[in-house]
């Protein structure tokens, strides 16, 4: 219970011939959604047949072996909690559809492992309290959960909740948790109960500042509550909180907390703002890089390729010490960077064109399919109306031979419908094939034109490297000759002197540098030219496979419907024979 709280007895309806009395804290104004949470930490008494004898109501778990959630447990729970009476019989007969279940209660079942829950994709409320669960797992597919109760278990670490982005109410009351963590994706969280755990550090409160929708927080029963000014600290650092430990935070508490921690909170807000700006800048950079990768031109919007050439050149720093090389390098870098930017801009422009072409293909295909579906639906609806009318007419015909003739006629009409729908589907296949061929031709032309353009620019980059190599070799040999003759006026650095030993040494160094640069250029070109073709091949293959699946599904739908119609006719014929 919360410290310094007045207690009172609340009478509840009679149970087993007696009355239940709830020893409750005086909690003031408590939000209705939290009442169920508070009931997990109260003490019950029972008055038997009006007697003054009172005994404690103990909540006990089964003493058998810990269990794993299995099919039998799930089906039993759904039957118990689902519709009862005639509605329950109908539901049981139709079969239990896990994906349609909205609420599930699995409390007091001695559960250790949370398995077999992945089918409950529509579940909004899940109750797993009062078990022996040690690890949160198996909830990845329950993305519609709004309310989750894991109280009274043996959980030590908060985990496995990342995909529950709709979660609003989470109870981890009475576990073994020491750190509030791994809740970052739960930005819709309104109520969080982590009372009666082992949380001792105030940093856990700071972690909760990111949850802007959090209004109710229960930390009662944790070591953190023993901290001096705990309530004021929480109130100051979580200013949007309305209830703390199920008590309303009044204005006086808020004013006192603000006055006490104003400077610290403002400093924290400043730091958070800077951190958020840094995160936003990083996000923008990440999105830009992904855009550049989609265009196959990442790291070509500046001197990155030039820098990488020299970064992997072991003699680059030594050769850069040659007289006159500095100006030569600056010119080389400037011209090469301009060519790389040309490739970069061409890639982005071509990405926009490819994207527009893909969107045009998708739109055209969808329109063709939708138009075909409308025609097929109208034909099927007309047939269905006619079939029902004839069925009703046949029921009024007393002559058996005439009824058989009607059934035979309906069979023929079903065959005709099948032929009509199949023909309609065949026309659609031909139409989509024409659209696909046009798209394939257009996208191939785009990719081919881009590759040709890139190859031309890379040829210019290689020309720049070749000219730089020739000029560098001339300077290197001229410097070697001056050093040999003692005519070199400037002092030669020691690193450069190790290359200016003889003509072979300096020539080999310059040639090796040149080979390194060319290899870097060639590798980047090969990568850039290969990826557009791979992308195009994968895209066309995916589109083709999608169309094959659509066509097979549609044919199956037609066949299944015709079989359904004929089965009904066969049933009518059989009943006629009997």
Image (spheres, rainbow, N blue to C red):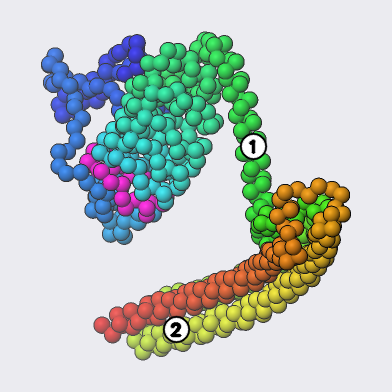
- Name which quarter of the figure residue 104 lies in: top left
- Name which quarter of the figure residue 262 lies in: top right
Q: Position of residue 460 (x, y in %)?
A: 81, 67
**Where, quadrant-wise, is the C terminus in this rendering?**
bottom left
The one of 478 and 368 positioned closer to us in this rendering: 478
Q: Position of residue 17 (x, y in %)?
A: 15, 26
**94 relative to 377 in the view: left or right:** left
- On screen, residue 356 above or below 125: below
Q: Is residue 217 magenta?
A: no
Q: Say what secondary structure mark 1 lies in.
A: helix
**505 relative to 35 in the view: left or right:** right
Question: Which residue lies at the image location 15% right of the left edge and 38% below the top edge?
Answer: 63
Mark 2 sits on what residue?
410
- On screen, residue 500 above or below 165: below
The one of 226 and 97 positioned closer to us in this rendering: 226
Mark 1 sits on what residue?
278
The residue furthest front is: 485
Magenta residues, as a range?
Answer: 103-123
The one of 135 and 556 positioned closer to us in this rendering: 135
Q: Earlier in the sequence, mark 2 or mark 1?
A: 1
Q: Is residue 369 visible?
A: no
- On screen, residue 144 above or below 259: below
């Amino acid at each position: 219970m919360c410290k310094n709280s007045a207690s009172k007895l609340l009478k509840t309806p009679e149970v087993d011939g007696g009355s239940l009395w709830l020893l409750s804290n005086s909690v003031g104004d408590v939000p209705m959604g939290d009442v169920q949470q508070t009931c997990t930490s109260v003490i019950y008494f029972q008055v038997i047949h009006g007697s003054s004898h009172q005994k404690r109501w103990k909540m006990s778990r089964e003493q058998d072996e810990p269990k794993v959630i299995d099919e039998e447990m799930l089906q039993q729970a759904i039957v118990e909690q689902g519709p009862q009476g005639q509605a329950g019989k109908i539901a049981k007969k139709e079969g239990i559809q896990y994906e349609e279940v909205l609420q599930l209660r699995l409390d007091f079942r001695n559960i250790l492992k949370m398995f077999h829950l992945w089918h409950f994709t529509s579940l909004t409320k899940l109750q797993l309290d009062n078990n022996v669960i040690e690890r949160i797992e198996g909830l990845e597919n329950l993305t519609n959960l709004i309310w989750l109760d894991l109280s009274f278990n043996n959980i030590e670490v908060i985990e496995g909740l990342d995909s529950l982005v709709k979660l609003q109410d989470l109870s981890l009351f009475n576990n073994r948790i020491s750190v509030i963590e791994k809740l970052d994706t739960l930005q819709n969280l309104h109520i969080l109960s982590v009372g009666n755990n082992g949380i001792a550090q105030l940093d856990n409160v700071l972690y909760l500042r990111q949850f802007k929708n959090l209004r109710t927080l229960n930390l009662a029963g944790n070591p953190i509550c023993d901290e001096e000014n705990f309530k004021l600290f929480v109130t100051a650092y979580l200013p949007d909180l309305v209830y703390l430990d199920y008590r309303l935070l009044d204005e006086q508490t808020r004013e006192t907390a603000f006055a006490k921690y104003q400077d610290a909170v403002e400093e924290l807000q400043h730091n958070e703002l800077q951190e958020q700006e840094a995160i936003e800048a990083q996000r923008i950079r990440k999105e830009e890089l992904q855009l550049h990768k989609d265009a196959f031109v990442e790291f070509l919007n500046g001197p990155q390729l030039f820098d990488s050439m020299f970064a992997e050149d072991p003699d680059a720093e030594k050769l850069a010490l040659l007289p006159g090389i500095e100006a030569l390098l600056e010119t080389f870098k400037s011209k090469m960077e301009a060519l790389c930017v040309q490739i970069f801009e061409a890639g982005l422009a071509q990405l926009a064109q490819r994207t527009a072409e893909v969107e045009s293909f998708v739109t055209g295909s969808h329109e063709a399919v939708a138009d075909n579906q409308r025609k097929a639906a109208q034909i099927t609806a007309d047939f269905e109306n006619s079939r029902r009318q004839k069925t009703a007419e046949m029921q009024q015909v007393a002559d058996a031979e005439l009824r058989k003739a009607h059934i035979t006629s309906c069979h023929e009409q079903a065959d005709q419908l099948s032929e009509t729908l199949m023909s309609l589907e065949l026309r659609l296949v031909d139409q989509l094939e024409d659209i696909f061929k046009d798209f394939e031709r257009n996208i191939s032309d785009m990719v081919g034109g881009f590759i040709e353009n890139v190859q031309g620019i890379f040829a210019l980059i290689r020309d720049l490297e070749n000219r730089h190599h020739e000029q560098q070799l001339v300077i290197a040999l001229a410097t070697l000759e001056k050093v040999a003759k003692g005519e070199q006026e400037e002092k030669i650095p020691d690193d450069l002197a190790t290359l200016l030993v003889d003509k072979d040494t300096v020539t080999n160094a310059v040639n090796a540098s040149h080979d390194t640069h060319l290899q870097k250029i060639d590798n980047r070109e090969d990568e850039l030219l290969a990826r557009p073709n791979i992308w195009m091949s994968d895209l066309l293959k995916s589109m083709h496979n999608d169309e094959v699946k659509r066509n097979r599904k549609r044919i199956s739908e037609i066949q299944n419907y015709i079989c359904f119609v004929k089965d009904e006719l066969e049933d009518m014929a059989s009943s006629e024979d009997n």
